[in-house]
Amino acid sequence: MNRAAPRSRLTVLITGGAGGIGQAAARQLAGVGHAVYAADVVYDQQQTTEHGITSMPLDVTNRDSIAALVNRITDETDGAGPDVLINCAGYSTPGPIELIPLSEWQRLFEVNLFGLVAVTQACVPSMRSRTSQQPARIINIGSLIGRLPHPLSAPYCASKHALVAVNEALRCELAQFGIPVILIEPGPIRTPFFAQMQDNLDRVRATTRHEPGSESYTESLKQAQAVFEYYGNRAPGPDVVADCIARAIQAKRPRAHYTVPRHNTLRRMGYRVMPTWLTDRMMRRLFHLDR
């Protein structure tokens, strides 16, 4: 168990900070006195006025947008830049691999992976100059399905699986500068993310309904929508992840990986020991992919 050590007021940059996990983390961290910059492609003025959060526009796929954000934070912190970077921006486009256009894959990776790398590259130079009394740290928000991928969400699963590799390499590269790199992997969380998934699924179904083979996935896509609705209504809220983020920031020696809620750790362990034929069968039955 990590023992929390008190840390003074920190400058925290959160991408994807206008909704879901990012918004919950922004409000919790601002509530305990940290200076929080919640950056998102959707500008949320209400967060600034109601919660003392500095909301800023950010398109993680645009280098100029990233530079403008980081430069402003650097200017407002007398050249110090962010103490903590929380990479939370991301979305999912569900559907069968056969039917999701390659352009959708490319756009998703631009946001979920390459955008994360671009923001990190912009922040690391100032982070390396931190003192041992006020070290920087980076927290990446992954997903349980980056380790346990399931059908009909391959682009998102692949982007989060790739994030695992990026996170592991970055942790080793920045250890020499005393910068912890932490991966938090939530299971299903009740946020607008699931409603967005359903909207994107409807869009994929509408644009591919005349494609050869689309009728083969009709039943499984209906079931996928039912699964998304189930988790969207019954999963724990984003505060459980915000709590984990706060612990990772506060810990003197943060863990390399956190899985939330904690019962998902057992789920990961179970999938490791189960034979592939069994996990495949479970997934096919869940998404009605058996004939």
Image: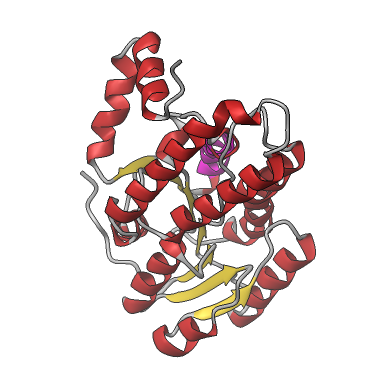
Residue 8 appearing in the image: no
Q: Position of residue 197 (x, y in %)?
A: 52, 50
Which quarter shows the N terminus? top left
| Figure quadrant of residue 166 | top right
Which quarter shows the C terminus? top left
Image mark count: 0
Residue in the picture at 66% in, 79% down: 75
171 falls in the magenta region: yes
The range drawn in magenta is 157-176
Front residue of this view, candidates 246 and 171: 246
Give the residue at the far right of this rendering.
64
Give the residue at the far bottom of this rendering.
49
Q: Position of residue 70 (x, y in %)?
A: 66, 69
Q: Is residue 128 left or right of residue 231?
A: right
Front residue of this view, candidates 135 and 250: 250
Residue 147 appearing in the image: yes
| Figure quadrant of residue 43 | bottom right
Q: Is residue 140 left or right of residue 255?
A: right
Front residue of this view, candidates 198 and 82: 198
43 falls in the magenta region: no
Which secondary structure is most common in the magenta stretch? helix
Front residue of this view, candidates 158 and 118: 158
- Which coloring applies here? secondary structure
Residue in the picture at 67% in, 77% down: 72
Q: Is residue 72 left or right of residue 276?
A: right
Residue 180 higher or lower than 272, as above or below: below
Residue in the picture at 47% in, 74% down: 36
Residue 275 higher or lower than 6, as above or below: above
Q: Position of residue 159 (x, y in %)?
A: 59, 38
